Image (spheres, rainbow, N blue to C red):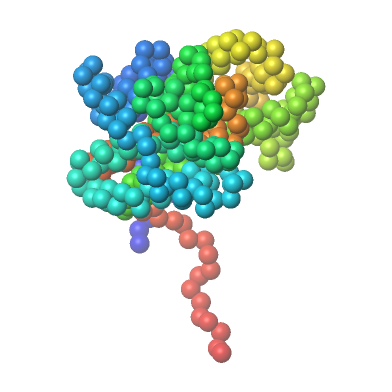
Amino acid sequence: TGVFTYDPGFMATASCESKITFIDGGKGILLHRGYPIDQLAAKSNYLELCYLLLNGELPTAEEYQEFSETINRHTMVHEQLTQFFKGFRRDAHPMAVMCGVVGALSAFYHEAMDISDAYHRKVSAHRLIAKMPTIAAMCYKYSTGQPFVYPRNDLSYAENFLHMMFATPCEEYKISPVFAKAMDRIFMLHADHEQNASTSTVRLAGSTGANPFACIAAGIAALWGPAHGGANEAVLTMLDEIGDESRIDEFVARAKDKNDPFKLMGFGHRVYRNFDPRAKVMKETCDEVLAELGLSDDPQLKIAKRLEQIALEDEYFVERQLYPNVDFYSGIILKAIGIPTNMFTVIFAMSRTIGWISHWNEMISNDYKIGRPRQLYTGAPQRDLPNR
Ligand code: CMC
């Protein structure tokens, strides 16, 4: 009953109050708990940002130490979970595997259902921060047929992830400090972005009182698509498809053609109608990594740079305020580090987990209602079944 506001795509609906992240899309501002993202990227690290997002304040030196030790205690996954991995086809997409495995964590931590207990909520958050890199790397190892590599707690968060991805029992992986810094930046720049599709999904699933690990699996599913987290993978696929600088104009013309569903992947954003502040930092990191590798002349990169230039100058993109977004650059960095394309969205999911669980925790700690949108019914009016 009643009259509802019709707002498809939630273009004008605030679904909640939140103290975690502020975005001004017009001005290109992104703040986490009040701190600008560029300052965090320059002076902080991912683990500290996790603490900030979850707890509301930056940790003191002792709090940081204690937090890192707590996270380290949880980095391993239950050995039985490895059996669960083995049920997947080995050529399954790593996002499909991650979605299933993270959902399965809810079977290992049923006590997490006690969401009214702040202690249980915190432990669930800590487990997720600690285990997501392990699970993400396991998804990769499983797809290559190499044995799973256990986490090493003497390494930093980003170093440990690179270790679990690339070390083997026969050979240690020599971790480049430039790569570790770039990975940490990628984690930070994807950590939270207020009520995006996947975070809203986690909140909606969580609003029913569901197990938080299952809610995170719902977030992973929502992130997967190319309009959201899947864009970083789609950028590289698109650069491959373009293949040569001579074909750029053809693809740009397709992106502008209203009768062609093709869009330039890595351009545009629902909220930013200005340069995405994360994209600025990502671009700098991208230049650093490519310079370190001596890859500044890479043909794919040349195509990327040309596309970037077109988007900043061409009337179609300028009029619609379609700037390169964070995923345009992150894909290029990840490729240069040696991460396979089908792992890009998995890395986005592991980075965004802190945002998801912080929003979930914020919702559960305050008054909230089950999320239940209404609709405008456009189907058949009431009618009778034919006589039979
Ligand atoms: N290439 C060509 N045209 C575009 C593009 C693009 N990438 N993005 C938007 N447009 C056009 C769109 O056709 C529309 O034109 P018109 O006004 O003539 O109909 C106009 O720009 C406005 O776009 P919209 O589709 O109404 O905007 P939206 O807010 O609904 O969608 C978006 C935002 C990010 C889904 C969309 O820009 C897109 O699909 N971009 C490519 C995928 C991508 O890079 N996604 C990653 C987003 S950042 C990471 C994340 O937060 O997940």
Which quarter of the figure has residue 16? top left
Q: Residue at x 80, y 22 (%)?
A: 246
Q: Does residue 313 appear left or right of residue 2 in this picture? A: right
Q: Which quarter of the rendered picture does the C terminus lie within?
A: bottom right
Q: Is residue 67 depicted above or below 136 in this figure?
A: above
What residue is at 35 percent from the left and 53 percent from the top? 107
Is the N terminus in the top left, top right, bottom left or bottom right quadrant?
Answer: bottom left
- Does any portion of residue 236 appear in the rendered image? yes
Residue closest to the eye, 251 or 230: 230
Q: Let me know if residue 249 appears in the view.
A: no
Spot occupied by residue 37 in the image (x, y as percentages of width and height) = 40, 19
136 w.r.t. 65: above or below: below
- Residue 325 location, x and y as percent? 54, 25
x 57%, y 22%: residue? 337
Name which quarter of the figure residue 64 lies in: top left
> Based on the displayed image, in which of its 4 quarters is residue 53 positioned?
top left
Q: Percent position (x, y) of residue 347?
A: 49, 32
**Residue at image x 78%, y 28%?**
250
